[in-house]
Image: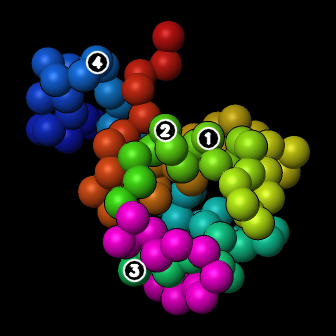
């Protein structure tokens, strides 16, 4: 089910795809269980995480594409998760973070 604002994004900057409840829940679980866990470094209220190393995601409000790039390639001291997670899991995690903080969803897959 698409959120009401997803349709507005079509007119503003291209097609965007809101994540469904199952994908968001998968992302929430991964946030706390992937190794190293995102929750160890990042603060994110929706995940009950109070990390002290990385940026506070609630303040940063990254869009899902930015999170996905960081997950794939790593950034700063954050490692890449491309060898640990499937593309589907990477996208679920990025979608969860963006959705939880009010960031834009991932563009629709082509």
Q: Earlier in the sequence, mark 4 or mark 2?
A: 4
**Pointer 4 with pointer 1, Cβ within 8 A:** no
Within 10 Å of disc 4 (Cα), the crowding (few <14, some 14-19, many 20+) is few
Verify whether residue 6 appears in magenta: no
Q: Is residue 52 above or below residue 1?
A: below
Residue under numbered circle 4: 14
**Pointer 2 with pointer 1, Cβ within 8 A:** yes
User: Residue 92: horizontal and vertical position, in percent?
Assistant: 55, 47
**Real-space Cα distance between discs 3 and 4?**
29 Å
Q: Which of 77 and 5 is in front in this view?
A: 77
Which residue is rendered at x = 36% and y = 40% of the image? 105
Within 10 Å of disc 1 (Cα), the crowding (few <14, some 14-19, many 20+) is some
The disc at residue 69 is: 1
Which residue is rendered at x = 12% and y = 29% of the image? 8
Q: Is residue 23 visible in this depiction of the protein?
A: no
Q: Which of 47 and 20 is in front in this view?
A: 47
| Residues shaded magenta | 46-60
Q: Classify residue 2 as left or right of residue 21.
A: left
């Amino acid at each position: 089910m698409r959120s009401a604002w997803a349709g507005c994004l079509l007119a503003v900057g291209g097609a965007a795809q809101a994540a469904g409840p199952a994908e968001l829940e998968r992302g929430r679980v991964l946030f706390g269980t992937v190794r190293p866990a995102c929750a160890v470094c990042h603060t994110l209220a929706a995940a009950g995480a109070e990390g002290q190393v990385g940026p506070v995601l609630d303040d940063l409000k990254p869009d899902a594409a930015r999170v996905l790039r960081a997950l794939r390639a790593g950034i700063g001291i954050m490692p890449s998760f491309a060898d640990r997670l499937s593309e589907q899991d990477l996208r679920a995690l990025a979608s969860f973070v963006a959705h939880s903080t009010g960031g834009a969803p991932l563009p629709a897959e082509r």
